[in-house]
Amino acid sequence: ANGPALGGSVVTLLGQDFKRDDQTYLKQVDPFTTVLAKVEVGYGVRVGGTACSATAWVSETSVTCSLAPGTGAAGAVVVTVAGNRSTVQGGFSYDLPAVAGVNPGNDTLHGTSGGLLVTVSGSGFGTFDDGQIAVVDGLDCAAPSPWVSDSSMLCTVPQGVGEALAVGVVHKPQGGAARQVGETGGLLNYARPVLSNVSGAELVQTGTLPYVEVTGANLGTMDFGNLIVTVGPNPCSDSVWVSDSSARCRVPPGSGTGAVGVTLNGVL
């Protein structure tokens, strides 16, 4: 089952031996007197560690729970009847967060070192701070990403490369479950790589593939593993990230004369 982070929806739990919340029985007061008495059978329902805001007995096989606000996936559902507990692991998940936009928007080019504070807007972020974080292209925001409301979070953009990247919100997993991520693509752009110089541009092929060094900007503040240097139409036999302003390329065989380019995270 699943429900909104705002809570309030009613879910029905099915099982057996859900006793009435009150029962009557004959109680012997003294050796000569017996009266009809009522006893309340205590029961409760917790979802993901949080008590339902209201519970109602329906039958011996059914009770209802009005969900309290919460976040997370694969939470345990625990029903307690007269002190006896029954648990269903992973029985409930709150809905995934939905990211609608980022401000400043995707017309802003971020430096590869990141650092700009942006506001992430959407819904289902949760009604309280439960350890949620914002992510860019799967990378956690560079600083703790403060929760603001069910529709807003802050994110200090992490270092990165690429264009039209997804921005998401991650809820803290419950019970060892995987991270619960709701993200939307095409919301954030880093500045494109720029080449300014190629050293060793004129080389004689001697049987050992030579390296050339390319310099420029926006090549990434760390090796993201997605850098490809090309000579003409051919990718280098080995592309090695060096710094945000430098990379090395082992020239591919038979390259001849051609322009040198750099592709980062699919962006040329």
Image (cartoon, rainbow, N blue to C red):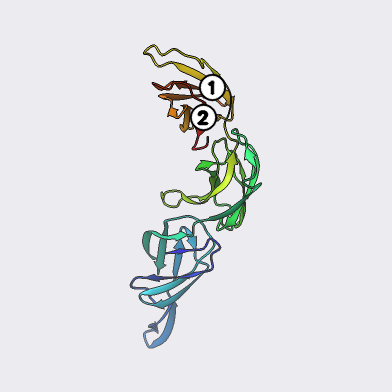
Whole-angstrom CA distance, mark 2 to mark 1, is 9 Å
Callout 1 environment at 10 Å: few (<14), some (14 to 19), or many (20+)? many
The one of 239 and 119 positioned closer to us in this rendering: 239
Q: Is residue 246 above or below residue 21?
A: above
The outermost residue toward the front is: 257
- CB under 8 Å between callouts 2 and 1? yes
Residue drawn at the location 47% of the way across and 24% of the way down: 240
Q: Position of residue 250 (x, y in %)?
A: 43, 20
Q: Identify residue for label 2.
A: 262
Q: What element carries label 2?
A: strand
Could you tell which of marks 2 and 1 lies nearer the N-terminus?
1
Whether residue 245 appears in this view of the structure is no
Mark seen at residue 214: 1
Q: Quadrant of the N terminus?
A: bottom left
Residue under the image location 51 percent in, 25 percent down = 260
In the rendered image of this protein, does residue 63 appear above or below residue 124?
below
Out of 148 and 116, give the one closest to the viewer. 116
Up the image or down, 23 lies above or below 152; here it is below
Residue at coordinates 33% horizontally, 72% vertically from top-left? 16
Residue kind at label 1, given as amino acid type: Val
Say what amino acid the circle numbered 2 marks: Val
Q: How far from the left and from the top, in percent, is residue 13?
A: 40, 70
Left or right of 183 on screen, residue 17: left
Quarter occupied by residue 64: bottom left
Badge 1 marks a residue whose secondary structure is strand
Residue 257 in view: yes
Pick out the residue farthest to the left.
Answer: 16
